[in-house]
């Protein structure tokens, strides 16, 4: 009798495990990421923008060797973002601080990325420094249907036109299912958090308008808003944006005094975030669904010693070249599809 009961439980456990394995095999996972890559500039002078400090003859001595080292570092990082969850490189990666299409061609054609079918969307923006946002995507799993930049009209403290980066919208099909991605790099806090807040609030309003446009065309549009917002999850610009369209911010729970994506004045900030519409929690069959969000702060991306141990291993510390990856950690969301 005891042996029969034992065999019954063994068979029951085996059946459960088998069913779990079947479910696991049916579940596809995709990484959608964002990465501020800290001034990915070529070595040539652009007469239109202020890129003079990133030239071979400039104080920062931005040489061919340093440029190629930066490309290698980034191309090693990108395919590893979220790989622990999906076993694959990201399907989509929003980027900030890109100079032009030439550097993106070098990036996707580099050693660690050339075997993947990455393409990119990029538009030159009027930003005074010449830094733009862009979107990398794996064309094997994401088909782009539409893209456009949105101009952010701002005035500076003197009432003069303030030229900043555009906001990028890319719409397409991720494994056959529609997804809209809005890539941002909002105005910085360089002149002070409070004095520059109005600029980020205006950027948030522009994103609200873009989401409204998308929802007018499709009330059930699935939307991801990503970027370096230069504000934390609980800053006014972010909370207003979240509340305006009932978005979900999975970065809320990741922000901590000892963890973030970038460091300013010895304090962690979580400026890099990905917000999503609540319909990415739907349990419908054949639907994209939120699974997990995280900061990709692997050890190889961190300073190894000294005062800044554990913070992002950046390319420059001020004007001093240290040869790292970026002054920001990437962030990512894992989506699933049955």
Image (spheres, grey):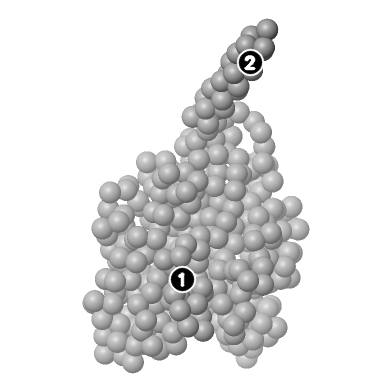
Q: What residue sits right under mark 1 in the picture?
A: 302
In the rendered view, would you say 240 is above or below 113?
below
Q: In the current view of this chain or complex, which residue is farthest to the left?
A: 64
The residue located at (66%, 49%) in the rendering is 277
- Whether residue 316 is visible to the viewer of this picture, yes or no, is yes
Viewer-side residue, 111 vs 229: 111
The residue located at (67%, 12%) in the rendering is 2
Q: Secondary structure at mark 2?
A: helix
Quadrant showing the N terminus: top right
Q: Secondary structure at mark 1?
A: loop
From the image, state whether disc 2 or disc 1 is nearer to you: 2
Quadrant showing the C terminus: top right
Name which of mark 2 and mark 1 comes first in the sequence.
Answer: 2
Viewer-side residue, 35 vs 244: 35
The residue located at (51%, 84%) in the rendering is 307
Question: Which image quarter: residue 66?
Answer: bottom left
């Amino acid at each position: 009798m005891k042996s029969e009961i034992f065999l019954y439980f063994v068979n029951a456990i085996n059946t459960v495990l088998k069913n779990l394995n079947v479910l696991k095999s049916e579940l596809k996972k995709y990484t959608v990421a964002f990465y501020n890559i800290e001034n990915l500039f070529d070595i040539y002078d652009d007469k239109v923008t202020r890129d003079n400090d990133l030239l071979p003859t400039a104080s920062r001595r931005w040489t061919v060797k340093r440029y190629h080292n930066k490309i290698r570092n980034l191309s090693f990082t990108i395919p590893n973002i979220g790989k622990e969850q999906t076993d694959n490189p990201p399907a989509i990666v929003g980027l900030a601080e890109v100079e032009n299409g030439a550097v993106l061609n070098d990036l996707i054609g580099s050693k660690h990325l050339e075997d993947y079918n990455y393409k990119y969307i990029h538009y030159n923006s009027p930003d005074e420094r010449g830094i733009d946002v862009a979107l990398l995507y794996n064309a094997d799993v994401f088909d782009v249907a539409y893209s456009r930049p949105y101009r952010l009209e701002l005035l500076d403290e003197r009432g003069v036109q303030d030229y900043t980066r555009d906001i990028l919208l890319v719409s397409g099909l991720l494994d056959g299912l529609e997804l809209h991605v809005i890539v941002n790099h909002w105005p910085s806090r360089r002149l002070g958090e409070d004095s520059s807040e109005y600029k980020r609030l205006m950027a948030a309003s522009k994103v609200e308008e873009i989401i409204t446009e998308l929802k007018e065309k499709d009330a059930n549009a699935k939307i991801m808003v990503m970027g370096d917002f230069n504000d934390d999850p609980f800053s006014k610009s972010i909370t207003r944006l979240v509340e305006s369209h009932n978005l979900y911010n999975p970065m809320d729970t990741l922000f901590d005094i000892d963890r973030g994506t970038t460091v300013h004045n010895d304090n962690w900030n979580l400026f890099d975030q990905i917000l999503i519409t609540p319909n990415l929690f739907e349990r419908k069959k054949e639907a994209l669904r939120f699974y997990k969000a995280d900061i990709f702060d692997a050890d190889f991306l961190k300073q190894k010693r000294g005062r800044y141990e554990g913070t992002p291993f950046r390319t420059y510390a001020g004007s001093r070249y240290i040869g790292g990856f970026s002054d920001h950690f990437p962030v990512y969301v894992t989506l699933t599809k049955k």
